[in-house]
Image (spheres, rainbow, N blue to C red):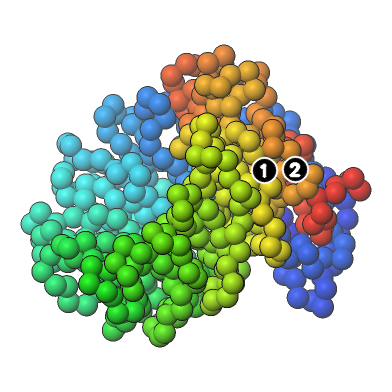
Amino acid sequence: MALRSATWAGSWTRWTSVQTVNGSCTGTIPCSRALTSSIRFRWTPSQGPRRISGLLPWNGRGDFRISADSQHVVYTAQQDTGGVWELYSVPIAGGQTVKLNSPLPTGGQVQSWSFEIDSSSERVFYIADQDVAGTLELFSVPIVGGVPIKLNGGLVTGGHVSRFEVDPLGNRVIYVADQQVDERYELFSAPAEGGPATKLNGPLATGTNVVDYDPDPLGQRVVYRVGLETDSHEIYSVPIHGGTATKLNGAMTPGGSVSAYAIDPLGQRVVYIADQQVDQRYELYSVPIGGGSAVKLSGTLADGGFVLDVSVSPLGDRVSYTAYQQGVVEVFTVGIAGGLSTKRNAPLAPEADVHGSGRFSPDGRWLIFEVRPGTGGRQLFRADVSTRETGTLLAKRMAPLSSYHFDPTSHRIVLLSHDDRSNEIWRPWSVPLEDPLDPTGAGLVPRAAFQPTADVNYVRVGSTGFVVYVADQETEDEFELFSVLPSPQSSLIFADGFESGDHTAW
């Protein structure tokens, strides 16, 4: 087994070696339950967080991504010219910042939220009016800098690229544009390194556009949703290189529509929410990605009930969903091909609701879901999906509008939480995902590293455990990017089968 780390001042301490069971484990972290002995690594940092960007716009607005190999952070900022968004890359442990976009025309800029890094961590894709001000197009550039290449086909007058996704293998880019007819948004596929683009959708009825889309995890097919002027939506599947599109949803009742969908990580099935049988009664269905008979997953709903959200386990074996019934929103799990649903939340206090369908941990063992008490605030709960247990309190305080992130081992969660001295100051926080739980958690960065009124706006975790965040850490209202590799007590990276959470042998 090899654990790869970014360059950083400090040291790893190796304790033991790895063996596999029946040769079936590849030595990656998700195989930890197959290990009979282990490598355990404890990080000993020699310094605190590093600033890795220049000054960001007020309040840290913009966005950033961590490359899959945790070697680079790519971010947008008005760093060189006020009012002009541009795209930058910097080593995650600090170093030389490189501007990725070409010189922009007057009035041109990179779309601050529209960029992605491919799975190989080699190229960055972004939308910008880089050639002609007011005409948004799709470009690709090496993550270390170089000459950008344009990926979209020629656009009609008034046309532009609105959004895109890179397929999980990094071979092709899927994008939506009114490329051929102004204001008619269609779906296209282009090679990631440049070449002719192919239209994926079939003929569209008047007033119809491609609403959203996702490539499957195998890079073989694209699932997309088509919307009509009447707000009726249906979903289709098509080969990623082009071909015949197949409708996935069943026959719709008049007024029926698909409201949401998700693809399983194995690329075999699509789950979707639709009022397919009764208008305004949204239910959950599962169907093979190439087409076939749909299976209802949500069971019988109470009168007036409907499904709101859905998530799929990384193992592809089950889904979680929230449903509104009898005045309350609750969360359930069910097998992806059908079966008995299990409620995962305990009885809720008056006015409390489950918010969102929850997220599965990367190893598929835990469902994490959010409860918003009627008194305000946000709490996270954990349920073991291999059992029928209801959720246990995982984190009792969480910043408004923020998300949470799993560390690379699925043993801890990183989130934004209140500083323990103030309810208005947010800090990167960590809570254990496995027993023994500690809903209060601990700060990832010492309080002394922050100026007194410092606030953290965004936080993400890389594949090697680096935490990257935006904060006015050094000077009030001057937001910058920082990275830190947490101390051992905040995040332990190991693979040893201690599934109970008892780490006393360490």
Report the residue marked by disc 1.
394
Report the residue marked by disc 2.
437
Amino acid type shown at disc 2 = Leu
Q: Residue at x 45, y 42 (%)?
A: 64
Please provide percent x and percent y for residue 258: 32, 66
Query: Which corner quadrant holds the N terminus?
Result: bottom right
Closest to the observer, 251 or 221:
251
Quarter of the view holding residue 423: top right
Quarter of the view holding residue 46: top right
The answer to whether the residues at label 1 and label 2 have Cβ atoms under 8 Å apart is yes
Please provide percent x and percent y for residue 334: 57, 68
Asked if residue 216 lies left or right of residue 441, the reply is left
Closest to the observer, 341 or 458:
341
Decide: is 143 above or below 79. below
Q: Which mark is drawn over residue 443?
A: none
User: How many neighbours does mark 2 have within 10 angstroms: few (below 14), some (14-19), or many (20 or more)?
Assistant: some
